[in-house]
Image: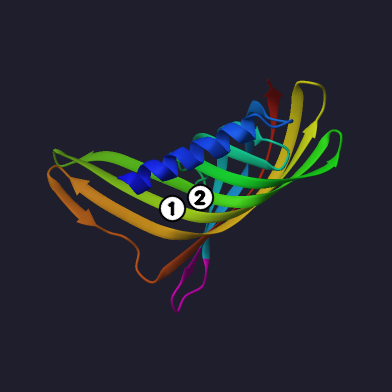
Amino acid sequence: MRKTLLVLLLVAAVLSSAFAAKDSSVMLGLSSGYSQLVSFHENADSTSMDIVPVKADALFYLGDSFALNVALGMDIYLPEIDGADAQTGFVADILAYYRLKAGDSFDILLGGGMSYRNQTERGTGEGNTTSESVNMLALMASLRLQIAASDHLGIFAGADVGYNIMNKATFKADSISIDVSPKNVNIMPWAVKAGINYRF
């Protein structure tokens, strides 16, 4: 308990000093782009899933050298078969960056973090309600370019690449739950993104 309290106090002290630094600010915006989940199957060719993410984006400048990015939104899974309906899912990213100033209005952000995805499909059949839920967690490396278009308006672009450390799939039918997680499959997500934000 004492160790936990000490860690929390240390984190609070670091964040307080960061926000008290010269250049601390908050930027809120929207982003979209293109992403893929590339699956490497044992003894088989790789496959990919095409995704268009749409996210609300919050960027926190913690002083002159560090930044934290939190993004929440929706993944739109593009259908693999013509005429099929697109599926949607939840996505959340948290990324920490080291900030390199390349000019008065241009920052290069280098870092990484984690990305969580969930896709749940529900259906009915023979009087039963069914659902299949897929949960994925990935470690990500990230590059972000942040440009100040004016005192308050900014634009940004970036690229992420990572590796899934969790691939959990569950099928449920009424009170029955079955683990259908893929075996011997490595999944690498990557994404390119762009957006606009407002600096407070």
Give the magenta range.
39-46
The residue under label 2 is which amino acid type? Met
Is residue 87 visible from the viewing direction of this image? no
Q: Nearer the viewer, residue 62 or 126?
A: 62
Residue 83 circle label: none
Which residue carries the number 1 mark? 137
Q: Which residue occupies 46% across, 43% down?
A: 84
Q: Position of residue 50 (x, y in %)?
A: 55, 50
Whichever of labels 1 and 2 marks the residue nearer the N terminus, that label is: 2
Q: Nearer the viewer, residue 52 or 153?
A: 153
Cβ atoms under marks 1 and 2 closer than 8 Å: yes
Is residue 164 visible from the viewing direction of this image? yes
Looking at the image, the residue that sits furthest to the bottom is 43
Label 1 – label 2 distance at C-alpha = 7 Å
Tell me the SS state at disc 2.
strand
- Foreground tag (1 vs 2): 2
Which residue carries the number 2 mark? 114
Tell me the SS state at disc 1.
strand
Q: Which residue occupies 64% across, 36% down?
A: 62
